[in-house]
Amino acid sequence: MGKKIYIIMILPLSVLLNFVFSRNTSFVEKYYSNGINKPTRQLLSLVTGIFSFSLGEILVYFFVILILLMIGKLFYSSIKDIKNSIECLKDFLVNMLCIVSIIYFLFLFLWGFNYDRTTFGETASLKVRPSSVDELYELCHSLIIDTNDLREKVYENEAGVMEFQEGYKGIFQQAPLAYENLSKEYPTLSGKYGKPKNVLLSEKMCYTGITGVYFPFTGEANVNVATTDFMLPATVIHEMAHQRGIAREDEANFVAYLACTSHPDDRFKYSGSLLALINSMNALRNADYEKYKELRLGYSEGVLRDLQYLSEFWQQYEGKTEEVFTKVNDSYLKSNRQEAGVKSYGNMVDLLLALKRK
């Protein structure tokens, strides 16, 4: 217990440090995000990028098995020696606290403090402010024109749905081009990082409603490759934004839009434009349903087919598992001061409006 108490004390110290950093965003931006953390993220990502599979996914499975073994050992010891069960429980709780303390510290050091950095909108000189419904209407209208135009330039399968003929491997291979172009305008997104990784249990992952996960302990952008082809490029670029220190979900979505539309491939452009359109039209539907219905009539037949397929795809995975993971994800986002929780995914619209004004 002697040495373990020092490990446990790292936890409250980490919480305190996180609290202090959250009040000093410019310091975090300069000395952490663009200072010590950027080369750390790149090195970690490049080293783990040597492997074709996701080390992060393997570590998650290993950790789950380890916890189950610890619980099993506690249960077995309690049955074998009831008098010693209190001591076993004490050891179990101490070990768990040590594990949590180490994991939380590593999370903050390797990536977590990026939640405390200056917002991407500020670094990109975008003036985010409340916008009128008419401004939102105009944004949606322009996105519909762009998305309809791009939809005409992409391949569709026999069912009339957009398809990436090279599969997810082709998307992974071409994805870095998006950041090569975008980083010229936004240097904070520059750097060399490891390639995206496919999740081995992607099909099962669909039941959680999760399309991708950035694993900060390995610097890997993990992607659920069982989802729709037309949304996959935007998902890959979104997770790669996390690799580049963009922690907030709404900002990662916005960066995904910028990067995809900067890509030379029209399929990436379409995916990013469709992501922005979905988010913006959802916001308009909540603000003015009549205007939403009016603009919806402007969708091309190809876009409508893709959106219908997207809806049908996710309907088959709806259930209790998705609800549980949504609540867990919501709690995670709120714990990192994204107060809107899962709803923060819609906040990219404010950035899109600011970009349109600029």
Image (spheres, rainbow, N blue to C red):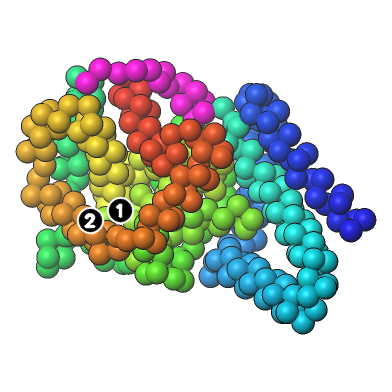
Taking depth in this image into account, of 142 and 89 the one nearest to the observer is: 89
Q: Residues within 10 Å of mark 2 (few under 14, many from 20)?
A: some
Taking depth in this image into account, of 17 and 46 the one nearest to the observer is: 17
Task: Tell me if 84 is positioned left or right of 155 in this view.
Answer: right
Residue 20, image x and y in percent? Answer: 71, 28
Residue drawn 55% across and 66% down?
Answer: 57
Residue labelled with disc 1? 231
Task: Tell me if 116 is positioned left or right of 167 in this view.
Answer: right
Looking at the image, residue 6 lies above or below residue 32: below
Q: Is residue 121 magenta?
A: yes
Residue 102, image x and y in percent? Answer: 74, 53
For the residues labelled 1 and 2, the Cα–Cα distance comes to: 9 Å
Quadrant position of the C terminus in the picture: top left
Task: Tell me if 286 is positioned left or right of 5 in this view.
Answer: left
Residue 176 seen anywhere in this rendered image of the structure: no
Name the amino acid, label 2.
Leu
Of the numbered discs 1 and 2, the one sitting upstream in the chain is: 1
Report the span colored magenta: 119-133
